[in-house]
Amino acid sequence: MKLVGIDIGKNSHFFCIMDKESGELDVLPSPFANNKEGFDLLIQNMKSYSKDSLLIGMEDTGHYHFALLKYLLDKHYPVALINPRTTDMTRKMQGSVSKNDKLDTITICDVLDTPERKKQYRITQINSFELYEQKQLTRHHHNLKEELNVYTNRLQKSIDVVFPEFNSLFKSKYGHVYMNVLKAFGSAEIIANTDIRTIRKCFDIQCRGKHISLTPEMLKECAKNSIGMSSSAEVIQIKHLVSQIELIKEQIAEIDKKIEEFSTKSNSPILTIPGISHFSGTSILAELGDISNYSDAKKIIKAAGVAPYHYESSQFNAEHTAITKKGSKYLRKTLYQIITPVIKFNKVFKDYYDLKRSQGKSHRCAQGHCVRKLLRVIYHLLTTNQKFNPELLK
């Protein structure tokens, strides 16, 4: 067996080839460019070995390795991805006081040269790139949602300055009329001094849903009696923020449509769990990656960072510890977002939640227990390709 360690860079990479049995280097650490010529040079150095006798390893860091990874997988080479923390820990355990690209290729080979039971890498497959696309979309969705929260909070702050009574006129925020009025006028002062026929145009919309009880006349009367202050700066901010909020909502809708296409195509059994939508299901699958990389459900609980710390020393054993949060924050966020509807729509999870609460657990702690139970169910469904059956959980 030959081990190929590749240290990834932005413009160029380094590689070495090590014999697994002897630990001797067949090819000393050498650079190659991050382009077609460089990739062909790497292939040329590996041509004398059969693909079955090679194991190529590289760090799963940033995005600079994607092109090389896709290139190698397309040529059917076995590639292992390694967490950068693993190589850093290996380097420190070896007592190394220096770090450079050449030495890192050898360290990567050392990580690959571990027993199967203790392997600290994961073999990747060509279909992982479809999961990569799904991961990028779901993460972009999460990030846009966070941006949306920032902009809506800033919008509410500005509204409180120029028209503090505005929200009380609407049963729900951010509807068509709500946003039209803010975009057109921006403050109570401007509304109070605007012709009623112009205000009516904001109410003239063709869309589905219930018609609001607020009338243009009621809005104008409220604006006349408003205690809001006059501020041209706040009005400009409101108009800009409304435009940004509407743009982000359009972008989220576009992403959700593509995510649903991926989800419908994969038709994963986890979608049969009540409370899991196309988005949340796709987010979970994309963050977990290839389920065959996990030998049991404990591994995906660890990957999500929802496993509680275990602290034991001498005769002391901590009974109450926080979750590790060592893993994908996006996966963890999705799990805690969906656990409420999962508990609501599944009696087995509701009973389990109530049991933990009766044992003195806090609401958040009981949710954590349900999240781990959910991950065990997800692991079982994915590894057996079975649909969710609550009767089997009793």
Image: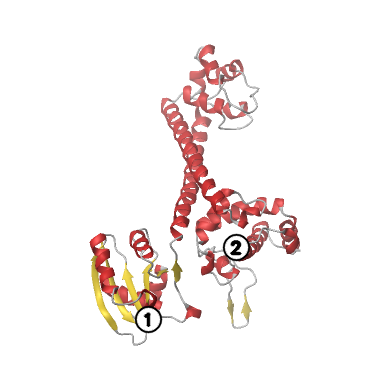
Given residues 18 and 157, the one toward you in this image is 18
Label 1 – label 2 distance at C-alpha: 32 Å
Picture quarter with the N terminus: bottom left
User: In this orientation, does residue 97 appear?
Assistant: no
| Badge 1 element | loop
Which mark, residue 119?
A: none
Q: Quadrant of residue 204?
A: top right
- CB atoms of marks 1 and 2 within 8 Å: no
Q: Is residue 129 above or below residue 209?
A: below
- Residue 299 visible at all: yes
Q: Nearer the viewer, residue 275 or 95?
A: 275
Q: Position of residue 164 (x, y in %)?
A: 56, 28
Instruction: Name the residue nearer the viewer: 280 or 123.
Output: 123
Residue position marked by numbered label 2 in the rendering: 382
* Vertical relation: 164 (above or below) 195: below
Residue 1: mark in rendering: 1
What type is the residue that disc 2 sits on? Leu
Label 1 neighbour load within 10 Å: few <14, some 14-19, many 20+: some
Circle 2 Cα neighbour tier, 10 Å, few/some/many (<14 / 14–19 / ≥20): some
327 to the left or right of 342:
left
The image shows residue 184 at horizontal and vertical percentages of 47, 22
Using residue 22 as the reference point, say whether residue 318 is left or right of it: right
Say if 48 sits above or below 207 in the image: below
Q: For this view, does 371 lie left or right of residue 131? A: right
Quadrant of residue 237 within the rendered picture: top left
- List x then y, in percent, for residue 92: 37, 77
Estimate the x, y position of residue 11 in percent, counting from the top left. Answer: 25, 60
**Which quadrant does the C terminus fall into?**
bottom right
